[in-house]
Amino acid sequence: MGNDTLHAEEGELAVLYLGSEPEEIIEPLFEAVNTLIEELITQPAKAEALYALIPETKREVAERKSKPVKAD
């Protein structure tokens, strides 16, 4: 298994061969996948949902204040 497996083209299937005794790696593997999903998908979605609860006028003010000031 090489670097190309980890960076497969979109739509390609990557296969992971675990050998003859995969039991010892299955749980850590699924924990790692679940952690990635939580950090990359679930948490951002929750943050967006919370952000959407803020009234639009308040969001606009906060966004204007958070933009970097351009130096001339």
Image (cartoon, helix red, strand yellow):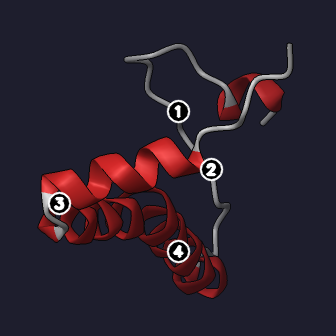
Whole-angstrom CA distance, mark 2 to mark 1, is: 10 Å
Mark nearer the N terminus (1 vs 3): 1
Residue 9 in the image: state x and y as whole percent: 54, 13
Secondary structure of the residue carrying numbered label 4: helix
> Quick check: marks 2 and 1 in contact, CB under 8 Å?
no
Above or below residue 24? Residue 36 is above
Secondary structure of the residue carrying numbered label 2: loop
Residue 44 in the image: state x and y as whole percent: 39, 60
Mark nearer the N terminus (4 vs 2): 2
Query: Relative to residue 32, is residue 63 drawn left or right?
Result: left
The quarter in which the N terminus is drawn is top right
Q: Amino acid at mark 4?
A: Thr
Secondary structure of the residue carrying numbered label 1: loop
Residue at the disc numbered 2: 17
Binning the other alpha carbons within 10 Å of mark 1 as few (below 14), some (14 to 19) or many (20 upward) gives few
Q: Amino acid at mark 2?
A: Tyr
Mark nearer the N terminus (3 vs 2): 2
Q: Amino acid at mark 1?
A: Ala
- Count of labels in the image: 4
Residue at the disc numbered 4: 35
Whole-angstrom CA distance, mark 1 to mark 4, is: 19 Å
Residue at the disc numbered 3: 52
Residue at the disc numbered 1: 14
